[in-house]
Amino acid sequence: MSHILIVGIATLDIINLVDHYPVEDEEIRAASQRIDCGGNAANTASVLAQYGHAVEFAGTLAHEPDGYRIEQELKARRIATGFCQHIKEGKAPTSYITLNQQTSSRTIVHYRDLPEYEFRRFQQIPLEQFDWFHFEGRNVPAVKQMLLDTQKRRVDQPISLEIEKEREDIDDLLPLADILLFSKSFATGRGFSNAPEFFESIRRLAPAAMLVCTWGEQGAWARDNNIREYHVPASPPSRVIDTLAAGDTFNAGIIHSLSSGNTLLEAVNNACQLAGKKVGQTGIEGLIT
């Protein structure tokens, strides 16, 4: 198994399951509620730890009760937090999530009052001990510095980068990673109705990178360094229960498979099956059996 460094965000998720999505000014009762550790990077780290990888999370943690709760949950999931940045002022990022029991959609209201992970803290990490680096595409100026520093200090370890949302100057990050993991919403937000055309636009920005893009019920597309293109259909469960963190789970499947020596096509196939399994259950615990 690999030693993997994951840089990004960990949140406190407050998840309410409701019979239907409320209209404005409606008062409804939640069928259930759970409070969990979430966030893109933390979710991906959690799934990779289930595979047996040695996972280190590097992000900002608040010195307050919710921040302590997040850190304890990460440790309970066998995720090391020694490279985290601890902040005395501020509040742990919190996502208030409404899960619609009828459609399995999730609506998120996110609150954040905490500085992003700083480059000066990242510089203190001994990168030579890792086999793989994964970054969440946020806080672009600092992440750009981290990616450049990683390229400078690594030997030949792969760098993967998740691009979920449009952010100012996000294109500056694309040439700095070996594997780019895109969301459908990012591609459609740029005006593309299919992954192959989207890949053509990205190839000009990151000609040497492997490209992967999820596309909801249509599965996922990928393009390797030799411009070979692959499509893998979705692997839906018999019943969709919870779509929260499906994309983060998919990304973990890609990283696990590629770090284990599988081909890109095998990695996408594994990731689609894993994401399908995830949406058929509540939460991400117990995915790998």
Image (spheres, helix red, strand yellow):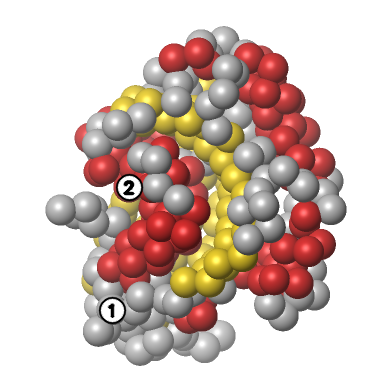
Identify which residue is drawn at 25% across, 43% down. 50
User: Does residue 49 appear to the left or right of 225 in the view shown?
Assistant: left
Q: Residue 71: where, in percent of width, then height?
A: 35, 32
Amino acid on which the number 1 mark rests in the picture:
Pro
Rendered image: mark on residue 47: 2
Q: Nearer the viewer, residue 3 or 197?
A: 197
Total tally of numbered discs in the picture: 2
Rendered image: mark on residue 25: none
Identify which residue is drawn at 45% across, 84% down. 21
Judging by the rendered image, the residue that carries numbered circle 1 is 237
Q: Quadrant of the N terminus?
A: top left
Q: Residue 164: where, in percent of width, then height?
A: 62, 57
Instruction: Please say if the residues under marks 1 and 2 sit with CB atoms less than 8 Å apart.
Output: no
Identify which residue is drawn at 58% across, 17% down. 155
Identify which residue is drawn at 59% across, 18% down. 154
> Which of the 4 image quarters holds residue 259?
top left
